[in-house]
Image (cartoon, helix red, strand yellow):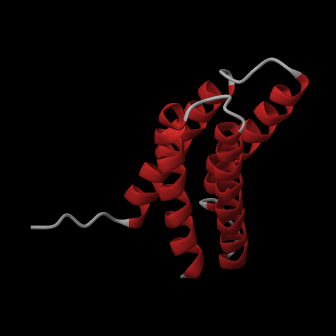
Amino acid sequence: MTKVIDIKEFSKGLEKRTRKFAVSIIQLSSRLPNTPEGRVIRNQITKSGTSIGANYREANRARSKADFKSKIKICESEASETQYWIEVIVDLKWLSWEKVKSEYDECSELLAIFSSIGKK
């Protein structure tokens, strides 16, 4: 028998998941080089990676459906940007694909979730 979860339970779980992802991105960013370029990328990925959960929390407290949808689109955009920065980090060989794969995969899943929510 499949388990059906209600919207509140789903929302709470996704809030927790995005917060856990934010922590993971902060930990990843702390492993970047302490150079001017490294600090720029660290700042960018930290901002985009932590913004996903912050905007999702705000979406859950939206004043209207339009406000909710707008915040969800921001989550989607920030997840896409976070993926971009992870790709740049790998291309620069600052961290190996193996060291960022779990964050990249989680970011892909979050992006898919927010894309799906945004289409409803």
* Quadrant of the drawing holding the N terminus: bottom left
Percent of width and height locating residue 108: 52, 56
Question: Which residue lies most toward the right here?
Answer: 36
Q: In the rendered view, would you say 26 is above or below 70?
A: above
Is residue 63 left or right of 13 when viewed as pictured? right
Q: Residue at x 86, y 33 (%)?
A: 40
Of 36 and 29, nearer the camera is: 36
Is residue 8 left or right of 64 when viewed as pictured? left
Q: How many marks?
A: 0
Question: Which residue lies most toward the bottom here?
Answer: 120
Percent of width and height locating residue 85: 71, 45
Q: Residue at x 64, y 51 (%)?
A: 83
Q: Residue at x 85, y 20 (%)?
A: 35
Q: Residue at x 69, y 52 (%)?
A: 84
Percent of width and height locating residue 74: 72, 62
Is residue 12 left or right of 26 when viewed as pictured? left
Of 61 and 69, nearer the camera is: 69
Q: In the rendered view, would you say 103 is above or below 78?
A: above
Of 93 and 34, nearer the camera is: 93
Q: In the rendered view, would you say 87 is above or below 70?
A: above
* Quadrant of the drawing holding the C terminus: bottom right
Question: Which picture quadrant has residue 38?
Answer: top right
Q: In the rendered view, would you say 77 is above or below 53?
A: below
Question: Which picture quadrant has residue 67?
Answer: bottom right
Question: Which picture quadrant has residue 90?
Answer: top right
Percent of width and height locating residue 98: 47, 34
Question: Which residue lies most toward the top here?
Answer: 34
